[in-house]
Amino acid sequence: MKVIIADDHRIVREGIATLLASEVGIELVGEASTGDQLLELLETTEVDVVLLDMRMPDKGGLEVLEELRGRERVPRFIVLSMHDDTSYVKRAIELGASAYLLKSVGKDELIRALGVVAGGGSYIQGEIAAPLIARMVDPSDAGPVGELSSREIDTLGMLAEGLDNRAIAERIGLSEAAVKAQLRAIYSRLDVTRRSEAVAVALRLGIIT
């Protein structure tokens, strides 16, 4: 996996580079301290994943994503930011970012996110996933998505496994009718209408992996 780090703070770039240096299969192929430097680097460098800072001189992360939107052969992006405001997260995802992590993220989660994104998946750090989902749901909904129960999250995981309602009911000790009711609540909170959509949203937002 070939990686570029784009961040205007040298100490951040060096710190991440040190973390990645010990990981087998990850190669750091470039660094950029501004948005324009990154765009120039992408013209000449083969890269799989870019670790992208939200705020940089000349062009920030969102501006870079917007400029690259619609181009062919664009790498996958992990936004690495100090900002947990859901408006930033939502906009980054809309512009094509595959993952959003806070700079407080630990090494293990960073490496995990890199693997997920390089494999074509999406990743949202757990502590910002619930507020993001809540923002995406109509405020008039009775149950805010940020309050998904552990059982509902477990049910989402079983949906991802491909289990039908009967199999889910047997596994968690509920009736099929109760499972159907739970699924209706989950669909409402995720603003979807079918199980495939629920699984896709849950995976994209990091609720399940």
Image (cartoon, rainbow, N blue to C red):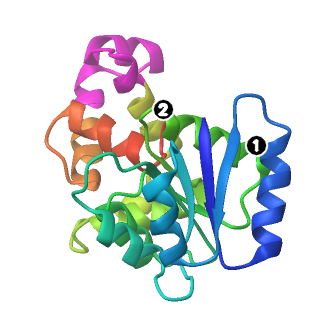
Could you tell me which secondary element the residue under label 2 belongs to? helix
- Would you name the residue on which mark 1 appears? 108
| Residue type highlighted by circle 2 | Asp
| Residue type highlighted by circle 1 | Asp
Magenta highlight on residue 55? no
- Would you name the residue on which mark 2 appears? 154
To which quarter of the image does residue 12 belong? Answer: bottom right
Q: As drawn, which residue projects farthest toward the front?
A: 44
Disc 1 or 2, which lies upstream in sequence? 1
Q: Which residue is drawn at 43% across and 51% down?
A: 98
208 versus 75 height, above or below: above
Q: Position of residue 20 (x, y in %)?
A: 77, 45
Q: Position of residue 199 (x, y in %)?
A: 32, 35
Magenta highlight on residue 169? yes
Tell me the quadrant of the picture where the N terminus can be found: top right
Image: magenta residue range: 158-180
